[in-house]
Image (cartoon, helix red, strand yellow):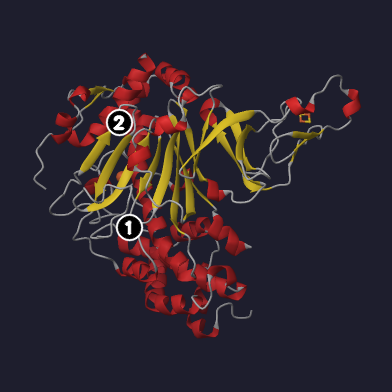
């Protein structure tokens, strides 16, 4: 690839080219400010689609550790999906203990108050003993929930300072046309990482590491003679912190006997390579040798899209030095057993490949904590890393 | 004990212990196995995979009878073994975040099969 050397610094001169301080990744005070100024106000992607809870009464529970809230998301009898604090309005007991399921309603196991699938308080045990109880005011405490192209998001602000649509920024045009609707979740993973969320995420924001970190899992799928360092062919950085990066695919990628089988039975995550049928909502039409796209919704969740599949993930901050990386694959709903076997191939390769990414994070984090280095040297290929630090620092200062 | 695989796959009966119904269990079995066991499983299953697929594809997934499920699980286990043999040359992923820090959750397809 004969791209000019500093394409992205020229596109985004305001980001500068100097070293970036590691302070925001190692300071506990900075983390507290991120919590107050960013996390409490952001739209959280729950990494779930409306189709994951298709029927009235279907629900899931998600702990959002960073704000300390257990969230219950449930589809009501009116087919509306709502989000609530998973807490009883009597004295605050946790209502639902299972991670997921289908229910006719929620009964508190402390004193038996019962809520319907719309979150309304339906029944109070021994009600006569109360004084002026107005049941209509005592539904489960609501949390703002909005849906973008089927993906569920929540916001803990009393009045969100921006709509989900605003937060999605250019993705409303660029990513929106992607064919999400026929996809089903075929795998979900949660990784505990002892590292700052930004350090963790940085390993997923450039292609520079691919030839080294993924030499086993992806020896030739994303790097080849024409692009040995996995140069990113397209990057779009939005002012609101959102980012889109096209990951290249290597045209000379050789299929192993097993990937060949996987293709015979279905499709794999490398099918963007040489695929001429354009996937709307991707960089495919504009990027030479397109593999898939990384789309980062500021601050830490992503909707990444490939040729006919996608994966959503998030780098959930738990503490300054703790992150949970959650990852879910959405592939075409398998009809035949052989398709399920085929999809297993992509799931396993990508699952294991993520473990390679995460290995670098904890040691990097320790070095930053020890102040072994206090600055990051970032190349033009790592401009998305630079952009993340810039955006976070500006938000915390603002 | 009665055979657990369809007649035409009686050659694989010795591997029926590998027919784990969840991805979490298949991953654990792979990591707990030796490279010799994985290579043996891989080389035995590879030439049988197309026949396995053709047999299972008599049904759509929702109609797949219970007695065909162990064969499907063997096919999915093949993918775990194959990744270890073809890519990692090791039962586990070298230079990676440890498997204990990873939770493999169960999703729709797996739950539907478990019934
Ligand atoms: S706390 Fe729920 S009924 Fe008392
Ligand atoms: Fe990576």
Label of residue A238 in the image: 2
Callouts 1 and 2 on one subunit: no
Label 2 Cα crowd, 10 Å radius (few <14 / some 14-19 / many 20+): some
How far from the left and from the top, in percent, is residue A116?
73, 39
Q: Which residue does the image show at 69% across and 33% down from the upper left?
A: A94
View extreme (top): residue: A397
Q: Nearer the viewer, residue A310 or A78?
A: A78
Location of residue A162 (image quadrant): top left
Q: Estimate the x, y position of residue A131 in percent, counting from the top left.
A: 87, 19
Q: Which mark is residue B18?
A: none
* Ligand 2 picture quarter: top left
Residue B112: give x, y in percent of width and height: 59, 61
Query: Which chain contains the residue that carries disc 1?
Result: B
Please provide percent x and percent y for residue A352. 38, 52
Quadrant showing the C terminus of chain A: top left
Front residue (pair A102, A357): A102
Of residues A259 and A216, the one drawn nearer to the viewer in this rendering: A259
Where does label 1 land, which residue?
Answer: B88
């Amino acid at each position: 690839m004969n791209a000019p050397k500093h394409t992205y610094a020229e596109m985004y001169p305001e980001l500068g080219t100097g070293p970036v301080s590691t302070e925001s990744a190692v300071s506990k005070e900075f983390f507290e400010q991120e919590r107050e100024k960013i996390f409490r106000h952001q739209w959280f992607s729950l990494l779930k689609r409306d189709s994951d809870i298709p029927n009235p009464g279907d629900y899931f529970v998600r702990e959002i550790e960073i704000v300390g809230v257990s969230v219950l998301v449930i589809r009501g009898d009116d087919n509306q999906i709502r989000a609530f604090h998973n807490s009883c309005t009597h004295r605050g007991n946790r209502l639902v203990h299972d991670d997921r399921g289908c229910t006719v309603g929620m009964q508190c196991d402390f004193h038996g108050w019962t809520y319907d699938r719309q979150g309304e308080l339906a029944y109070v045990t021994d009600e006569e003993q109360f004084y002026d109880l107005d049941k209509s005011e005592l539904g489960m405490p609501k949390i703002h929930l909005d849906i973008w192209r089927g993906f569920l998001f929540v916001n803990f602000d009393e009045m969100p300072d921006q709509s989900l649509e605003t937060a999605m920024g250019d993705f409303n045009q660029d990513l929106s046309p992607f064919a999400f609707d026929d996809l089903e979740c075929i795998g979900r993973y949660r990784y505990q990482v002892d590292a700052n969320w930004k350090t963790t995420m940085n390993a997923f924001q450039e292609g520079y590491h691919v030839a080294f970190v993924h030499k086993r899992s992806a020896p030739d799928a994303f790097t080849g003679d024409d692009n040995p360092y996995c140069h990113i062919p397209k990057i779009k950085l939005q002012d609101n912190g959102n980012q889109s990066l096209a990951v290249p695919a290597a045209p000379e990628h050789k299929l192993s006997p097993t990937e060949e089988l996987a293709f015979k039975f279905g499709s794999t995550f490398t099918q963007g390579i040489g695929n001429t049928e354009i996937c709307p909502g991707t960089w495919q039409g504009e990027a030479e040798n397109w593999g898939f796209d990384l789309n980062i919704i500021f601050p830490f969740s992503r909707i990444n899209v490939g040729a006919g599949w996608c994966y959503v993930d998030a780098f959930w901050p738990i503490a300054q030095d703790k992150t949970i990386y959650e990852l879910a694959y959405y592939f075409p709903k398998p009809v035949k057993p052989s398709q399920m076997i085929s999809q297993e191939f992509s799931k396993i390769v990508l699952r294991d490949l993520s473990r390679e990414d995460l290995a670098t994070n904890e040691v990097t984090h320790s070095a930053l904590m020890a102040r072994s280095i206090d600055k990051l040297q970032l190349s033009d290929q790592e401009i998305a890393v630079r952009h993340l630090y810039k955006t976070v620092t500006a938000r915390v200062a603002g | 004990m009665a055979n657990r695989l369809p007649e035409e796959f009686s050659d694989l009966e010795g591997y029926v212990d590998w027919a784990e119904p969840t991805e979490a269990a298949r991953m654990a079995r792979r990591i707990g196995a030796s490279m010799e066991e994985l290579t043996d499983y891989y080389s035995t299953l590879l030439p049988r995979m197309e026949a396995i697929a053709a047999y299972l594809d008599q049904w759509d997934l929702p109609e797949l009878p219970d007695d065909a499920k162990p064969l499907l699980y063997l096919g999915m286990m093949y993918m775990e073994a194959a990744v270890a043999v073809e890519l990692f040359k090791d039962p586990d992923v070298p230079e990676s975040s440890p498997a204990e820090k990873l939770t493999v959750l169960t999703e729709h397809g797996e739950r539907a099969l478990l019934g």
